[in-house]
Amino acid sequence: MPSQSVLEQKKAIVAELSERLKSSITGLVVSYEGINTEDDTKLRKELRENNVKYTVVKNTLLSRACEDAGLEDIKPVLEGTTALATSDSEYAAAARILCGYAKNHDNFKVKSGYLDGAVIDMDTIIALSKLPTREVLLANVLGAFQAPIAAFARAMQAIVDEGGVEACLNKAAAEAPAEEAPAEEAPAAE
């Protein structure tokens, strides 16, 4: 039977994992079996750079933390080697990095995940992994906001290049086709 101090340590770990699951916006459970130290180091570095916390965990401890956090649907995949990746700031970072890594490493597999406190299926995880980074999304939004302003600025510059508003109006009037006089109607045949 484990000593009281070991039980207290395990309870503390479960409490910490439970709080981590509750406070993060997204997380993935992966099987890291068969990866070498060099690849693991690169993976952890990339996850750290993207503010994703990655930890190897015992299945029994994570199972209890999942119960406490209301993520019981993750429990069936908790077997074999297990690591938990959580993010407090970006929804797609963990999925993008870990799914990309799993494509290149046969033994590394994404088992399950959650988003905003609800367990998600693999299709959702794969869809998250295909989202661009936050910076790219922000750049796209800013580009969309700037497009109308840039078009207006180009139109104004074209007017200035033509010599002003009056010059543009005179040019438009000269290029417009002259209105034709209505043709006389032929007498109706009776």
Image (cartoon, rainbow, N blue to C red):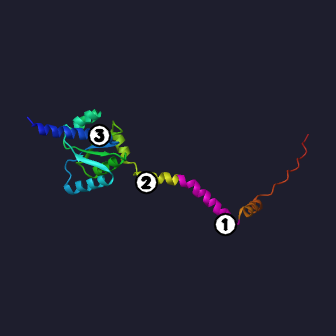
Q: Amino acid at mark 3?
A: Leu
Q: Which residue is mark 3?
A: 21
SS class, disc 1: helix
Q: Amino acid at mark 1?
A: Asp
Q: How many marks?
A: 3
SS class, disc 3: helix
Q: Are marks 2 and 1 in contact (CB under 8 Å)?
A: no
Label 2 crowd bin: few (<14), some (14–19), many (20+), radius 10 Å: few
At x 24% / y 41%, what residue is drawn? 16
160 in magenta: yes
Q: Nearer the viewer, mark 3 or mark 2?
A: 3
Q: Which residue is mark 2?
A: 136
Q: Quadrant of the C terminus?
A: top right
SS class, disc 2: helix
Measured in 3D between alpha carbons, the distance from the residue under mark 3 to the one under mark 1, in whole angstroms, is 61 Å
**Highlighted range, magenta:** 145-163
Q: Position of residue 109 (x, y in %)?
A: 26, 45
Q: Looking at the magenta stretch, what is its main secondary structure?
A: helix
Q: Position of residue 33 (x, y in %)?
A: 20, 47
Label 1 crowd bin: few (<14), some (14–19), many (20+), radius 10 Å: few
Q: Position of residue 123 (x, y in %)?
A: 35, 40
Q: Which residue is mark 1?
A: 161
